[in-house]
Amino acid sequence: MSKIHELSSVLADQIAAGEVIERPASVVKELVENALDAHATQIDVMVAEAGIQSIRVIDDGDGIADDDVLIAFKRHATSKITSRADLFRVQSLGFRGEALPSIASVADVVLNTSNGTTGTSIHYRGGKLLKQAPAPLRKGTDISVTDLFFNTPARLKYLKSAQTELANILDIVNRLALSYPGVAFRLVHNHKELLKTAGRGDLQQVIAGIYGVQNARKMVAITGESADYQVTGYVALPELTRASRQYISLLINGRFIKNQQLTKAVIKGYGSKLMVGRYPIAVVAIHMDPLLVDVNVHPTKQEVRLSKEPELAKLISTTITERLANVNLIPSALTNL
Ligand code: ADP
Ligand code: MG
């Protein structure tokens, strides 16, 4: 008898979930990214007990047609790319078709969605479809995730304190809000509002909402350009520092990323203006041809590979250095806050 067999799709989804869905904040990230890809203008995130009890994301985006809903929960099923060429010029935040099946395999998921023509409600638990029924035609998607990791006890046990998990969720939503100033975000935890942005496309206002108006006033606009890259954003004056690098946000074509070299480039831009162990608050938005960046490096898509990283690093540090040298010449753009 053959010893080798294909894993069931439920088991395969659970294995994939191990990479994509590490903690409650990963669920929030994936669901909000789906809402953004669906052109939502308003995204409400409601969590209870740091997301361990429940996570609900409501958007006013495109919704999913009734005959697409089941497919959306299949692994590697996506509406965002079709060809190999698309993979190399990904414009959307998602493209791997892994989030919904992964989440549904390790939690209880109820999704209500409407594209304006059809409305569907669907209920999955531990990868099993429990119910599908018609739902009202309120355009957009409303998804609730409860009992996260109920069937993966090790993952549940590995979760940190509620405080840490909530800090991770807040960090993710903050960065998504910084990436999309044109979208109105609301984050509510145990009925308490933690973040609200207006969605008017004004990055300064989003920064003020996250870091406080006083701090936002101590940040200046930057803009720079090289052959392949454009850099815009806001950086703190040297007097406004933090004890950690985590207040440096890097965005590539609207996706927030983690990249040590580029983070170092931001710090380098300050030269000797920073005290040892102190780091700036900065939001650096990079725009570039998607062909120059490979986002398909890791399932969470936060690591990317750049073809001309040294050029970009140099652009970032010189843009910041030059801007800070001119601080007294150009008044802060934030005086209107
Ligand atoms: P991916 O985002 O990589 O395509 P997902 O598993 O996250 O994969 O979602 C699968 C598909 O379900 C998406 O491609 C999209 O068509 C649809 N979808 C998921 N969430 C939403 C949403 N909030 N609004 C509209 N469509 C959605
Ligand atoms: Mg997705």
Image: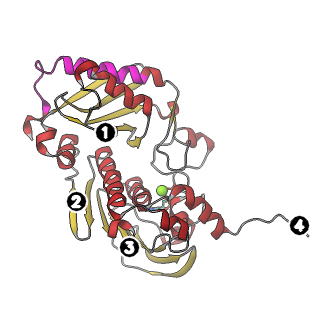
Question: How far from the left and from the top, in percent, is residue 318?
Answer: 31, 18
Marks 4 and 1: which is nearer the front?
Answer: 1
Badge 2: residue crowd in 10 Å (few <14, some 14–19, many ≥20): some
Secondary structure state at the residue bearing disc 2: strand
> Are the residues tagged 4 and 1 within 8 Å (C-beta)?
no
Residue position marked by numbered label 3 in the rendering: 53
Residue 322 spot, x, y in % from top left: 24, 17
Name the amino acid, label 1: Ser
Task: Name the N-terminal-most of marks 4 and 3.
Answer: 4
- Determine the residue located farthest toward the front in the rendered image: 276
Mark number displayed over residue 146: none
Q: CA distance from mark 2 to mark 3?
A: 18 Å
In the image, taking residue 227 as reference, residue 87 lies left or right, namely right
Q: Residue at x 45, y 47 (%)?
A: 92
Q: Position of residue 33 (x, y in %)?
A: 41, 54
Tell me if residue 219 comes above or below residue 144 in the rendering: above
Q: Secondary structure at mark 3?
A: loop
Residue 26 on image: x %, y %: 44, 57
Q: Is residue 53 above or below residue 329?
A: below
Judging by the rendered image, the residue that carries numbered circle 4 is 2
Q: Which residues are magenta?
A: 312-333
Distance between mark 4 and mark 1 Cα atoms: 54 Å
* Prevailing secondary structure of the magenta residues: helix
Amino acid type of the residue that numbered disc 3 sits on in the rendered structure: Gln
The answer to whether residue 29 is left or right of residue 46 is right
Q: Is residue 176 left or right of residue 15?
A: left
Residue 328 highlighted magenta (yes or no):
yes
Residue, disc 1: 244
Residue under the image location 47 percent in, 68 percent down: 65
